[in-house]
Image (cartoon, rainbow, N blue to C red):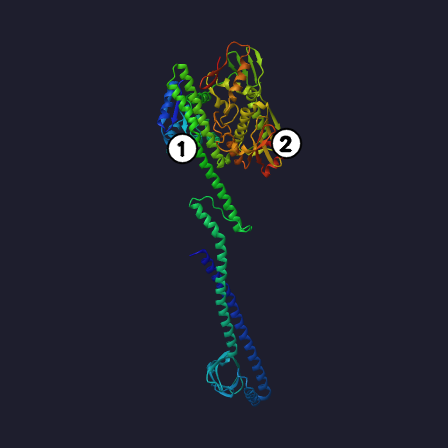
C-alpha cells in the first residue's frame, strides 16, 4: 500500500527519523527542508499526504498551507509543531490542515494519524453504508450495532467511539486521536479517561464472545480488528 | 524648550493676537467716529453762514465771520478767502494747502491760524460766496487727534499689558500642566529605568489628567502582572522541572542497569511516561502564559456552557465511578450562552473534575455545577472530599503551588493556576469555597451585557 508522502521539515534529524519510519511502512517519501520548496513540490498535487512543520524557513508552514488551499489543492496535510497550546492547535486546524501533531511525538502516534489521513484520501465507493468488522456489523444510518446477529446496546458516545474505530479498522488509533475526533477536545487529560471509555466499550463488544475485537496496542493506543 | 515655556509663549502670542484684533477695531472705529463728528460740525457751521450770506449779502457774512473769529474758540477756523486763497477776513492767517484750484472738493486743509506759529490740520468746508471768494469754515482737528493719540497710547499700553498678562497666564497654566504631567513623566522615567513599582499618584479629580493617570496605572498594573507572571513562570519552570527530569533520568539509569529484558522494557515505558508528563507540564505552562496574555481571544465563540458541562459529566462519569464517586450535573434551569473559548473552558472544567476525582473521590459525590446568577456564569465542581483549608487556598491557585509537601505524586501543580488563567482570559476569577465538608471550585465569568438578548433571541446562533 505504498503511498507518496511529502515531508516539509527543516530539522534533519526529525525528517530522517520520519522518512525512515514511513519508508519502512512501505511509503515513498520525499523530503524538503523549507517552505518554498515544500509549496513548490506540493503544488503538483501528486502526493497523498503532506507532513508539514509549522516553523520552516523562507515560507512558514501555515502560509504554505494557506497557499495550497487557496490553489484548491486538497491533499491531506498533517501539521507538526512545537507550539502546543490549545489556541495554536485550533489556529493550525482552522488554516485548513487535516490534523495537528505536537512535537515531540511518538512515531506510533504520527503513523496512526498519517494512516487515518491516507485512508480518508482513498476514493472508496461504498456500496454498502454498513461497516463490518469480522462478525460485528455497524449500521451508521440507524446507529445500531450487532455482533453475530445479536444487538449490542450502546450509549451515543460509545457508538461514536465504535464507529470511529470501525472506520479505522486494522489501524492503530491513539488516545489523543480519540479525544480529538470523538470528543472534539484538544487538550491532554491527566487521567485515563479515554482508557476507561474504551474498556467499557470493549466489555460490551466482547462479553459472551471468545474472540477479542478491540485490541490494546502497547505504547500506542487501540485497534479494532477481527 | 520646556513645556511650561512653550505654553507661556503660546498664551502670550494668543493674547497679543486677539488684543491686536480688538484694539485695531477700536482704533478704526473711534477715528471714523471723530472725523465724522468733526465733519458734521463743520457742515452745520458752513450751512449757517451760507444762510447769513444769502439773507444779508457779503456785508452780513463779513460781520458774522469776524464775530465768529472773535468768539475765540481756538479750534474754530472761519474765514473768507479771495480767489487765490488768501484770507481776507476771519481768524485764519494762511491756507498752506490745498491750492485755490482744488477748493471745490477739498475736505481737509492745512491752515495757519492767527496768533499761532505752527500749521494745523483741519477738517474744512469751502463754499463759494460771489466774486470768486470762498467761505472757509473748519475745525482744527488737534482736539480729535489728541484724543485719538491718548486713545492709541492707551491701546498700545493695553496691548503690551495684555501680552505680559498672557505670558503670565501661560506660565501659570504651564506650571499647572507641568505639575500634573510631571508625575506621569517621572513614573514613566522610572519604568523605563526598570523599576516597575512606580505608579502615578491620583489627585482624585475626574478630569483628563486624572483619567490619563488612572489609565496609565491600569496599564502598568497589567504589564507588571504579566512580567511577574513571566518571571515566576520561568523561575518555577527552572526549579520545578528538576524533579520530573530527575525522575526521567533515574528511570533511564535503571533501564541501563536492568537485569532482564522485561525489566528494561518496564523502565523504558516509565521513561516514556515521564517524558509525556514533562511535555504536559510544558504545554500547560505555555497554555497559562498564553491565556494570561489574552492571545487566544480571537477564538472566542458563542456556546452553551450547560451543554459543555453535560458532555464533560458524561465523559468523566465512568472515571469517577471507578474511583468510587457518583457524578451528577447540577445546572440552573436557564443557562444563557456564553461568549468564550470553548476548548479552554472545557479544559478548565476538566481540570477541576480531574482534581475532584483525584483528591475527593472518597467523599462519594462530585457535582459539576453550571449556574447563571446575577449576570455571572458559575462553572465548576463541588465535592465532599477533604477540601482545602481557607488559609491555603491562595497557595493552591498559585503556579506550581502543590499542597502535598512531599510532592511525591506526579504533576506539577499547574492545574488550578491554568484554571485561574483561563478564568482571567474571560475576565473572571477562580473562586474556592468551603463545601462543609469538601470543596467548591468555581470559575466565575461575568456575562457580557449583550448576552442577555439571547434569552429572547432565537438560539440558532448559539447552538
Nearest the eye: B385 or B226: B385
**Mark 1 → mark 2, Cα distance in angstroms:** 46 Å
Reading the image, the residue beneath label 2 is B334
Q: Chain letter of disc 2?
A: B
- In this image, B138 relative to A113: left or right? right
Local packing at callout 2 (Cα closer than 10 Å; few below 14, some 14-19, many 20+) is few
Residue at the extreme top of the image, as rendered: A210
Describe residue B337's horizontal placement relative to residue B176 as left or right.
Answer: right
B302 vs B17: above or below:
above
The percent coordinates of residue B460 (x first, y second) are 59, 31
Give the SS element for disc 1. Answer: loop
Point out which mark residue B406 bears: none
Where's residue B12, x and y in %?
Answer: 48, 62
Q: Residues within 10 Å of mark 1 (few under 14, many from 20)?
A: some
The residue closer to the viewer here, B45 or B209, is B209
Tag 1 residue:
A60
- Residue A179's x, y, as percent? 50, 24
Pick the quarter of the image with the N terminus of chain A: top left
Rendering coords of residue B158 (x, y %):
50, 68
* Figure check: B279 above or below A208: below
Where B322 sits versus B112, above or below? Answer: above
Amino acid at each position: 500500500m505504498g503511498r507518496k508522502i511529502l515531508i516539509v521539515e527543516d530539522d534533519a534529524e526529525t525528517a530522517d527519523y520520519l522518512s525512515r519510519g514511513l519508508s519502512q511502512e512501505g511509503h515513498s517519501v520525499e523530503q524538503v527542508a523549507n517552505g518554498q520548496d515544500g509549496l513548490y513540490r506540493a503544488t503538483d498535487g501528486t502526493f497523498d499526504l503532506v507532513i508539514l512543520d509549522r516553523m520552516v524557513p523562507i515560507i512558514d508552514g501555515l502560509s504554505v498551507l494557506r497557499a495550497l488551499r487557496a490553489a484548491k489543492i486538497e491533499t491531506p496535510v498533517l501539521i507538526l509543531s512545537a507550539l502546543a497550546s490549545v489556541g495554536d492547535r485550533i489556529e493550525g486546524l482552522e488554516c485548513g490542515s487535516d490534523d495537528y501533531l505536537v512535537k515531540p511525538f511518538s512515531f506510533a502516534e504520527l503513523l496512526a494519524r498519517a494512516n487515518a489521513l491516507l485512508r480518508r484520501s482513498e476514493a472508496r465507493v461504498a456500496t454498502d453504508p454498513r461497516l463490518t468488522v469480522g462478525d460485528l456489523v455497524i449500521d451508521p444510518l440507524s446507529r445500531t450495532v450487532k455482533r453475530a446477529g445479536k444487538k449490542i446496546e450502546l450509549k451515543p458516545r460509545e457508538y461514536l467511539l465504535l464507529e470511529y474505530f470501525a472506520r479505522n479498522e486494522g489501524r492503530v488509533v491513539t488516545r489523543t486521536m480519540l479525544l480529538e475526533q470523538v470528543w472534539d477536545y484538544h487538550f491532554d487529560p491527566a487521567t485515563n479517561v479515554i482508557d476507561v471509555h474504551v474498556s467499557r466499550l470493549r466489555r460490551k463488544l466482547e462479553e459472551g464472545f471468545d474472540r477479542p475485537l478491540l485490541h490494546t496496542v502497547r505504547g500506542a493506543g487501540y485497534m479494532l480488528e477481527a | 524648550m520646556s513645556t511650561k515655556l512653550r505654553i507661556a509663549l503660546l498664551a502670550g502670542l494668543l493674547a497679543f493676537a486677539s488684543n491686536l484684533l480688538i484694539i485695531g477695531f477700536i482704533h478704526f472705529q473711534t477715528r471714523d467716529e471723530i472725523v465724522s463728528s468733526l465733519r458734521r460740525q463743520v457742515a452745520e457751521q458752513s450751512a449757517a453762514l451760507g444762510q447769513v450770506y444769502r439773507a444779508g449779502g457779503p456785508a452780513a457774512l463779513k460781520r458774522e465771520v469776524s464775530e465768529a473769529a472773535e468768539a475765540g474758540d481756538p479750534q474754530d477756523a472761519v474765514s473768507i478767502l479771495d480767489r487765490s486763497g488768501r484770507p481776507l477776513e476771519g481768524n485764519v492767517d494762511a491756507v498752506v494747502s490745498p491750492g485755490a484750484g482744488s477748493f471745490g472738493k477739498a475736505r481737509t486743509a492745512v491752515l495757519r491760524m492767527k496768533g499761532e506759529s505752527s500749521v494745523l490740520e483741519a477738517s474744512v468746508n469751502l463754499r463759494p460766496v460771489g466774486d470768486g471768494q470762498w467761505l472757509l469754515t473748519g475745525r482744527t482737528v488737534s482736539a480729535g487727534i489728541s484724543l485719538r493719540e491718548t486713545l492709541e497710547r492707551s491701546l498700545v499700553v493695553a496691548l503690551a499689558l495684555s501680552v505680559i498678562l498672557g505670558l503670565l497666564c501661560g506660565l501659570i497654566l504651564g506650571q499647572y500642566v507641568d505639575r500634573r504631567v510631571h508625575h506621569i513623566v517621572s513614573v514613566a522615567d522610572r519604568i523605563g529605568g526598570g523599576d516597575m513599582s512606580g505608579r502615578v499618584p491620583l489627585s482624585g479629580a475626574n478630569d483628563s489628567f486624572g483619567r490619563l493617570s488612572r489609565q496609565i496605572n491600569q496599564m502598568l498594573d497589567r504589564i507588571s502582572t504579566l512580567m511577574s507572571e513571566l518571571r515566576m513562570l520561568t523561575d518555577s519552570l527552572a526549579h520545578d522541572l528538576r524533579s520530573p527530569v530527575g525522575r526521567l533520568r533515574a528511570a533511564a539509569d535503571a533501564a541501563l542497569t536492568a537485569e532482564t529484558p522485561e525489566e528494561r522494557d518496564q523502565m523504558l515505558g516509565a521513561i516514556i511516561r515521564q517524558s509525556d508528563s514533562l511535555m504536559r507540564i510544558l504545554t500547560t505552562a505555555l497554555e497559562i502564559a498564553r491565556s494570561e496574555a489574552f492571545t487566544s481571544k480571537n477564538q472566542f465563540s458563542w456556546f452553551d456552557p450547560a451543554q459543555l458541562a453535560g458532555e464533560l459529566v458524561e465523559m468523566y462519569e465512568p472515571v469517577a465511578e471507578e474511583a468510587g464517586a457518583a457524578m451528577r450535573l447540577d445546572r440552573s434551569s436557564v443557562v444563557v450562552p456564553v461568549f468564550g473559548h470553548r476548548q479552554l473552558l472545557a479544559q478548565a472544567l476538566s481540570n477541576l473534575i480531574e482534581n475532584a476525582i483525584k483528591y475527593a473521590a472518597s467523599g462519594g459525590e462530585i457535582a459539576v455545577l453550571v449556574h447563571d446568577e446575577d449576570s455571572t456564569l458559575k462553572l465548576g465542581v463541588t465535592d465532599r472530599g477533604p477540601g482545602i483549608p481557607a488559609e491555603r487556598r491562595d497557595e493552591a491557585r498559585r503556579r506550581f503551588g502543590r499542597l502535598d509537601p512531599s510532592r511525591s505524586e506526579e504533576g506539577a501543580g499547574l492545574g488550578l493556576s491554568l484554571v485561574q488563567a483561563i478564568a482571567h482570559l474571560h475576565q473572571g476569577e477562580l473562586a474556592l469555597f468551603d463545601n462543609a465538608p469538601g470543596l467548591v471550585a468555581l470559575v466565575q465569568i461575568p456575562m457580557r451585557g449583550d448576552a442577555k438578548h439571547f434569552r429572547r433571541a432565537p438560539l440558532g446562533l448559539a447552538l
